Amino acid sequence: MDAVREVEIGVKRNKNWFEEYFDFAYHNTDLRTEILAGITTFMTMAYILFVNPAILSDAIGKDAIPSLVTATALSAGLATILMGLYAKKPFALAPGMGLNAYFTYGVVKGMGYSWQVALAAVFVEGLIFIALTLTKVRSAIIHAIPLSQKYAIGAGIGLFLTIIGMQEAGFVVDSPATLITFGAQNVAKPEFWLAIFGLFFAAILISRGIKGALLISILTTTVIGIVLGITPAPDRLFAMPTLSHTFLQMDLRGLLSVGAIGVVFAFFMVDFFDTLGTITGLSAKAGFLTKEGKVPDAEKVLLTDAIGTTVGAVLGTSTVTTYIESAAGIEEGGRTGMTALVTGALFLVIGLFISPIATVIPAYATAPALIIVGYYMLSAIRGVDFSDPTEAIPAFLVLVTIPFTYSIADGIGMGFISYAVVKTLSGRYKEVHPLLYILAGIFVLYFLYLGGVF
């Protein structure tokens, strides 16, 4: 009886500690609500455990999938736990969609850099992010980039993911006449129809408000493929985590070129403003915003994000960023860092050991998730004022340049240059921040370098 009494007292003390540390009373929440919210957030974004390794393995190699699963789970778990304990916000983090695609298809396959150099670019970008978060330079950059450009970059990345997903699914293929065309030759393949099923299934689940729709779609489509004999079944469900292929593989020396500097800049710009936009939206949903529209403790949130990116590069994954899927947990009532703590713990407890499952997840199962995430990100374009051509046309150029050139960096550059030129020659040069002129000039030199002018 004494032992039971001691356990009850211990649980009570722990509960009181959680309540006081996360200030449950102020946020009008309780431990049960926070735990359920954390589980909900994890279920909503757990698809990244399968999609991120699938994308990065196209650059690093399929034999690296176990290491990539570990790097994904570990970076997401540690960063999210840090968010909970340090920033005390119900926001979860993981390797960002769009940035992982840019890592593989833009930097490695498109520009020809090694994946080790790409990891180094992510690492340096994280260090820059940390430095700017700790200084006043951060606010200068925030004010320099027009809101329409921020929205357009997010939407353009959405289209970038969409075209990658459609290629992976076999919906579109190369064409010497039109560059891309409908993949008619794939219609007879069962993988094509399984991708169609996964896409429609995910759309229906989302429409019905089912939590974890993308994860459910990926796993269900994979199981059907295994049953039909299209995909081999895993020889086991769990395995010990490993980082043998990816840990400390950054090639910092390989960054010593003008082109690589552009890669670092692109990673930083997308990470910085995507995070800023995400935490603002999540804070608005949770009721955190001040009367002036500011996010309390924004520096802590941004610093957590930056640290997550730097640590993620060391582990072997692309940029770690705050996830908009955290809104699912907030919708369930999560208001404190306890929600993030639960989500992070689940990434570590579950995600670290599922590499055997991830190795058999086929492209036709993950491709629909890329398309649906593209749909989510494209909605950002609604924030652009299309009644003002000086805002809308540069935003449009960003939107189309990113997917059509297969490069986030090129899209950002086109946006900055066109914004500066259109505003200036329209007699509205005062609306352009001086720093944006500098950034536009840098991109002009970057494009000239790519074109072999110097």
Image (cartoon, rainbow, N blue to C red):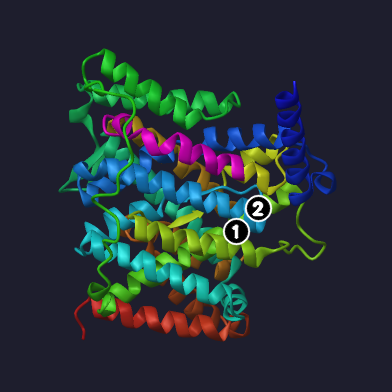
- Residue 355 located within the stretch drawn in magenta: yes
- Determine which quarter of the picture holds residue 25: top right
Dot 1: within a 10 Å radius of its alpha carbon, few (fewer than 14), some, or many (20 or more) residues? some
- Determine which quarter of the picture holds residue 352: top left
Does residue 23 appear left or right of residue 320 in this picture?
A: right
Q: Residue furthest left?
A: 176
Q: Which mark identifies residue 281?
A: 2
Magenta span of residues: 341-360
Most common secondary structure along the magenta stretch: helix
- Determine which quarter of the picture holds residue 299: bottom right
Q: Amino acid at mark 1?
A: Gly
* Residue 33 placement (x, y as % from top left): 72, 33
* Residue 173 placement (x, y as % from top left): 22, 40
- Residue drawn at 53 percent across, 24 percent down: 205
Secondary structure of the residue carrying tag 1 is helix
Q: Nearer the viewer, residue 429 or 294?
A: 294
Please tell me whether residue 410 is drawn above or below residue 404 in the rendered image: below
